[in-house]
């Protein structure tokens, strides 16, 4: 299987991991690695001031949710909502699909990841009204970097229509990790 974006980021930073050998000889992974390096170049060109409105939305949502002072409850809410949406999605799959069990399970897993990713993203982006200015510059930079990573993953997802389900699952897992990392960065910014 190809390297995840996370693994490629490690390799880019000079850290060896289980896929290092594969990446050396894989054109696809090399290509993605190059994209990452390009992104890094773009990041260096970014203004250090707080960026787009989209980002402020994320910030606003996080402030709202962290005001509840109960992140655990929020996380549970995310999964409860994801599970609720998932149930209907899975019913659709079992009703209309004649795929074999294993493939069915993979599809189920992929749908679950997509739902989880969308739910997480919705929670991060729904609130529009508050735009707090409480985040320090290094956190802002980390979050901006994660947004670029999200963008890259989205590009890969868009072009993965013909890829196998394994690859798609890995991409969605990557996407969820990036969203969770954005959430965590807001958590560190607001909870001390
Ligand atoms: Zn590869």
Image (cartoon, helix red, strand yellow):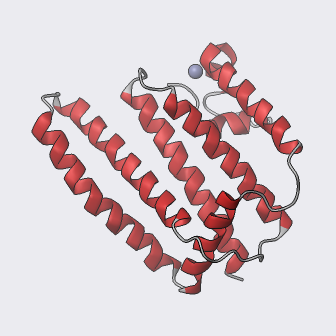
Quadrant occupied by the C terminus: bottom right
Q: Where is residue 50 in the image (x, y as percent from the top left)?
A: 80, 62
Q: In this view, does 38 lie above or below 136?
A: above
The picture quadrant where one finds residue 142 is bottom right
Q: Position of residue 163 (x, y in %)?
A: 43, 22
Q: Is residue 35 above or below residue 95?
A: above
Q: Ligand 1 shows up in which quadrant of the image?
A: top right
Q: In this view, does 187 lie to the left or right of 86?
A: right
Name the residue rendered at 55%, 51% in the picture. 177
Q: Is residue 135 left or right of residue 63?
A: right
Name the residue rendered at 41%, 20% in the picture. 162
Q: Is residue 85 above or below residue 8?
A: below
Residue 26 visible in rendering = no
Residue 70 visible in rendering = yes
Q: Position of residue 20 (x, y in %)?
A: 67, 26
Q: Where is residue 26 in the image (x, y as percent from the top left)?
A: 62, 15
């Amino acid at each position: 299987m190809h390297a995840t974006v996370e693994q490629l980021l490690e390799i880019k930073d000079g850290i060896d991991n289980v896929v290092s050998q594969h990446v050396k000889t894989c054109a696809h992974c090399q290509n993605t690695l190059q994209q990452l390096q390009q992104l890094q170049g773009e990041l260096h060109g970014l203004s250090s001031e707080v960026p787009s409105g989209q980002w402020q939305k994320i910030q606003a949502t996080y402030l709202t949710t962290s005001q509840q002072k109960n992140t655990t409850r929020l996380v549970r809410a995310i999964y409860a909502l994801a599970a609720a949406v998932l149930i209907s999605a899975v019913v659709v799959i079992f009703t209309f699909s004649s795929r074999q069990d294993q493939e069915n399970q993979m599809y189920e897993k992929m749908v679950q990841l997509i739902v989880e990713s969308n739910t997480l993203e919705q929670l991060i982006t729904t609130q529009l009204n508050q735009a707090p200015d409480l985040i320090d510059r290094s956190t802002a930079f980390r979050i901006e970097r994660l947004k670029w990573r999200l963008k890259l993953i989205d590009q890969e997802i868009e072009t993965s229509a013909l890829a196998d389900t394994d690859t798609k699952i890995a991409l969605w897992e990557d996407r969820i990790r990036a969203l969770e990392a954005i959430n965590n960065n807001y958590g560190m910014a607001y909870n001390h």
